Image (tube, rainbow, N blue to C red):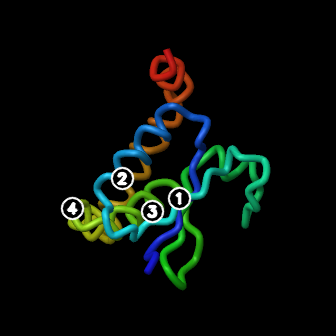
C-alpha cells in the first residue's frame, strides 16, 4: 500500500537524483512519485506552486510542502523513518523548514551544476 504520495519536479536534475535515491531505499514502494513537470499530470494544487516547493500527502492526510513534505516521505521509508519521526517535533520541523528555504535560494545554481 502506498503510504505517501510525493509531487516533484522531474525536470530538475537534483530532484530526479533524490527521487531515484528514495526509490532505491523504498523497495516496498511505500512512496508514490508524481512528476509535476509532465504537462499531462493532473495536479491537486497550482502547478507553479507545486514546482516551486516539494509537496507530499500521507495516506488520508492533508497535502503539505517543504520540510513537512520531506518528513512525510522519510516516515514512509524504513531507513529514513527515524528522521521523519524526529521532524514531528515542532522545533525540529521549524529548523528543517528554515534550512529548506535557504536551499530554495541556491537551488537554481545547484540545478545548473547537477545538469552539467
Q: Are marks 4 and 3 in contact (CB under 8 Å)?
A: no
Residue under the image location 28 percent in, 56 percent down: 25
* Residue 73 picture location, percent across and down: 40, 63
Foreground residue, 15 or 25? Answer: 25
> Disc 2 on helix, strand or loop?
helix
Q: Which residue is mark 3?
A: 68
The residue identified by callout 4 is 79
In percent of the image, x 34 and y 62: which residue is there? 74
- Secondary structure, mark 3, is helix
The nearer-to-camera label among 3 and 2 is 2
- Quarter of the image where one finds residue 10: top right
x and y percentages locating residue 69 in the rendered image: 47, 61
Q: x and y percent of residue 58 in the render? A: 48, 75
Disc 4 and disc 1: Cα gap in Å?
18 Å
The kind of secondary structure element at disc 4 is loop
Please give the residue where the numbered disc 1 appears in the rendered image. 33
Disc 4/disc 3 C-alpha distance (Å):
18 Å
Q: Is residue 79 rendered to the left or right of residue 72?
A: left
Query: Which residue in the rendered view is the most extreme toward the bottom?
Result: 60
Residue receiving disc 2: 22
Amino acid at each position: 500500500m502506498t503510504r505517501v504520495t510525493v509531487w516533484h519536479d522531474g525536470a530538475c536534475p537534483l530532484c530526479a537524483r533524490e527521487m531515484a535515491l528514495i526509490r532505491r531505499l523504498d523497495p516496498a514502494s511505500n512512496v508514490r512519485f508524481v512528476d509535476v513537470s509532465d504537462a499531462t499530470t493532473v495536479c491537486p494544487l497550482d502547478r507553479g506552486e507545486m514546482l516551486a516547493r516539494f509537496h507530499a500527502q500521507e495516506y488520508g492526510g492533508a497535502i503539505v510542502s517543504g520540510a513537512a513534505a520531506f518528513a512525510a516521505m522519510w516516515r514512509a521509508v524504513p531507513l529514513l523513518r527515524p528522521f521523519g519521526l524526529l521532524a514531528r517535533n515542532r522545533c525540529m520541523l521549524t529548523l528543517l523548514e528554515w534550512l529548506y528555504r535557504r536551499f530554495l535560494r541556491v537551488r537554481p545554481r545547484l540545478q545548473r551544476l547537477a545538469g552539467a
